[in-house]
Amino acid sequence: MSETKRFAYFKEVAIGASVGALVLALVIVGFSISGVAGLQTPGPSSSPSNSSSAVSPTATAAACLVTPQLSDSRLGNVQALVVNAANDQVLLDVNGQTASATASTMKLLTAAAAMQILGPNYRVATHIYRDPTDPSVIYFVGSGDPTITRVGPGKQSVYQNAPRLSDLAVQVNKALGTTPITKIVTDSTMFGGPQWLPSVDPAERTNGYLGLVSALEVDGDRNDPAKETSPRSATPELRAGTWLKQALGASATGATVLAGKLPTNATAIATVQSQPISNWINHMLAVSDNTQAEYLARLVSLAQNLDGSFASVDASTKKALSSLGLDASGSVILDGSGESPENAVSPAFMVKLVKQIFLASGNLAIVKQSLPVSGESGSLQNRFKGDNIDAVGKVFAKTGWIVHGYTLAGYITAKDGSNLLFAVYALGPKVENSAKDAIDALATGIYRCGADLGNSTPTPAPTN
């Protein structure tokens, strides 16, 4: 996938003696010709080495460069693209056309797809049914809402104001009257395919970053519903049924919990609805909730008549993004969260998406409003300290982290007032947690340069 790039070039202008005095006066008052229209020419290739050599000496001398930040070894195999939002001028391109692992910046694609296909007011309804022939048997059917919580009234899970099992229990007990419940059958068949990607380390589940992706879960299958990062189980559906049994109380004392499938002609006796999807987007982007991301990707898939499987996410997300005029055909989208290191999206495509978010195109105003802000909110609240403190409140971006990979994508309101769209990837076997500080330093450098940012090339690390 290629992208048209434009760079501003300075030209030597021969001034005749008849206008010499005028030029001298303009120089004295500090007049600059760097922004004059008509001075842009097609830029060089996306290769970093070619990019720097193709810029004229005059332009390079006048540009504001971030070469020291780009050369920070903590960035590993760095990729970066920066574009001026006002005119689509490419200011910095370091391997920006190469599709690579996104980490959690993938959630920008998932959020945009969900907003376009589902809309901000979409809610997920979860039902409990009574067996058509045996009223003592009930079916707890998953509809893709992992936010349902087992915490009681007056308390909150990680998902604020989520639907409660206790509300379902009250409705079931009212519908059944004195009929005791003998079986609670859990149905999680709405999503097709496996519940885990082989490319994702199982430790992500046991450490508590993401659970199995089942259509029926309670509290995202967390051991502790009040903690974002909490270990998950290997049997989310059965745990959901067990927690429902506890909520039902005396009517379900002797009930067994087992997996099964809803029969035809069953009668719905209880229903709860999720918070609007706009609330999911806000929480997902702020704290990088992998669970909500995976479920949003599947709901988008089902809404487009696909099967809600991992295998469907690539086609589903790309189709959704095409409604924004975005062609993601050069990308590989394996999940909704970015957990898989085998995802591949270029910084160039990420910046194209960021532009649509910046413009609040379609239904993307919620996505724009939900971006973490440097030093102030979400996953950027505790970043941009020390030497980078002048960029606090100026970087609006989604963070990303996987093993040996850190990313950041969004927009910067620069020191000179310009708005710059950017994506930075720090990838490689030696990339560690300190890469975040190096990314922040690079973003701060971009903030300070603003529209005067010039195409920089990282200095190769010395070889031993």
Image: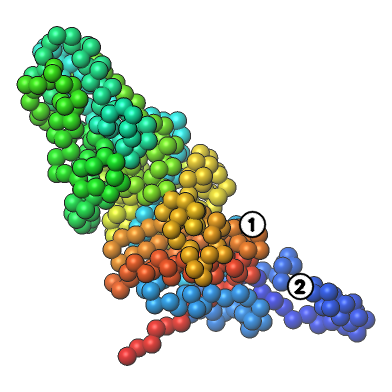
Residue under label 2, please give it.
Answer: 32
- Density class for disc 2 (Cα within 10 Å; few <14, some 14-19, many ≥20) is few
Quadrant housing the N terminus: bottom left
Residue under label 1, please give it.
Answer: 86
Sequence-wise first label, 1 or 2: 2
Farthest residue toward the top?
178
Q: Residue at x 54, y 79 (%)?
A: 52
Q: Amino acid at mark 2?
A: Ser
Vertical position of residue 457 compared to residue 37: above or below: below
Q: Is residue 257 left or right of residue 442?
A: left
In whole angstroms, how far apart are the C-alphas of marks 1 and 2? 19 Å
Q: Amino acid at mark 1?
A: Ala
Question: Residue 27: which quarter of the image?
Answer: bottom right
Percent x, y of residue 410: 49, 56
Q: Residue at x 91, y 84 (%)?
A: 17
Vertical position of residue 155 compared to residue 57: above or below: above
